[in-house]
Image (cartoon, rainbow, N blue to C red):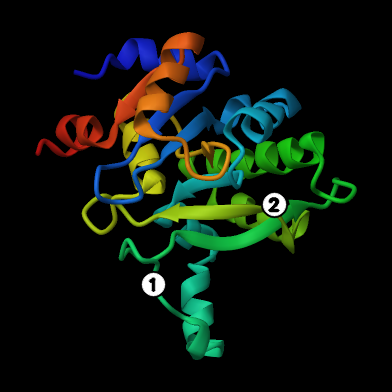
């Protein structure tokens, strides 16, 4: 059973949790931080200890509120020959790639932290029902393409990737729909489940299996 109080406290302290998806799917572990707590040190940790693509995660509903959609829809319409599903079968969660206007190149740890902090502020405005202000902030303060990909959760009933697992867990914990994630890599492949468990134990970062999230949040 997921310990809601401990997990929420852990994330609100700016510490990561680890989420493994499922055997037979990607079979990958993502390092996850709460968007509200991002600093350049968080980005540095994701970059050096996880190693995969650093992505900002929110929900499809939030995306719709500010008027953004999945990049796959744009690809289908404009470059149909390039549209293909990944081998694990799900539609991708990617939306736009953005930088905040106050960043320099957008790629440094501090630049990406700045972009993510401001994306969190947009989400916070939406969740507080300040939709017009959120839209104004997003379109006035961000540009695309940039160095921070936004992922939109399609919901666990549609897709069971790390994006959806993270957003379902955050909702369960009572946190805003705002996270930063990166896949954990090994020397030449993704970090195995066994090695993820060792890393979790050595560093005191909770490792949560996707099956646990499905059971607790969806009740299956």
Q: Position of residue 34 (x, y in %)?
A: 52, 29
* Quadrant of the image occupied by residue 167: top left
Q: Quadrant of the N terminus?
A: top left
Q: Is residue 100 left or right of residue 204?
A: right
Q: Nearer the viewer, residue 176 or 52?
A: 52
Which disc number belongs to residue 137? 2
When the figure is inspected, residue 49 is found, relative to residue 22, above or below; the finding is above
Q: Position of residue 189 (x, y in %)?
A: 50, 45
Q: Position of residue 110 (x, y in %)?
A: 80, 34
Q: Which residue is mark 1?
A: 85
Which of pointers 2 and 1 lies earlier in the amino acid sequence?
1
Q: For label 2, count other residues whose C-alpha is less than 10 Å away and answer few (under 14), some (14-19) or many (20+).
A: some
* Quadrant of the image occupied by residue 212: top left
Which structural element holds mark 2? helix
Q: Residue at x 75, y 38 (%)?
A: 114
Q: Position of residue 211 (x, y in %)?
A: 20, 35
Q: Is residue 141 left or right of residue 20?
A: right
Real-space Cα separation, disc 2 to disc 1, in angstroms: 33 Å
Q: For label 1, count other residues whose C-alpha is less than 10 Å away and answer few (under 14), some (14-19) or many (20+).
A: few
């Amino acid at each position: 059973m997921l310990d809601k109080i401990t997990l929420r406290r852990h994330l609100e302290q700016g510490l990561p949790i680890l989420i493994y998806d499922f055997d037979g799917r990607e079979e990958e572990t993502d390092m996850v931080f709460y968007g509200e707590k991002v600093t350049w040190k968080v980005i540095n940790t994701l970059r050096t200890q996880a190693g995969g693509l650093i992505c900002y995660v929110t929900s499809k509903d939030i995306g719709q509120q500010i008027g953004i959609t999945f990049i796959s829809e744009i690809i289908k319409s404009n470059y149909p020959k390039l549209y293909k599903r990944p081998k694990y079968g799900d539609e991708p969660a990617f939306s736009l790639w953005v930088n905040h206007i106050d960043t320099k190149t957008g790629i440094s740890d501090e630049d990406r932290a700045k972009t993510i902090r401001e994306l969190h502020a947009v989400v916070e405005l939406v969740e507080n029902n300040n939709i017009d202000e959120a839209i104004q902030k997003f379109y006035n303060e961000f540009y695309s393409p940039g160095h921070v990909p936004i992922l939109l959760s399609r919901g666990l009933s549609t897709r069971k990737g790390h994006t959806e697992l993270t957003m379902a867990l955050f909702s369960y914990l009572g946190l805003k729909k705002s996270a930063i994630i990166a896949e954990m890599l090994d020397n030449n492949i993704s970090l195995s489940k066994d090695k993820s468990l060792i890393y979790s134990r050595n560093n005191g970062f909770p490792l949560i299996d996707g099956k646990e999230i499905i059971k607790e949040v969806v009740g299956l």
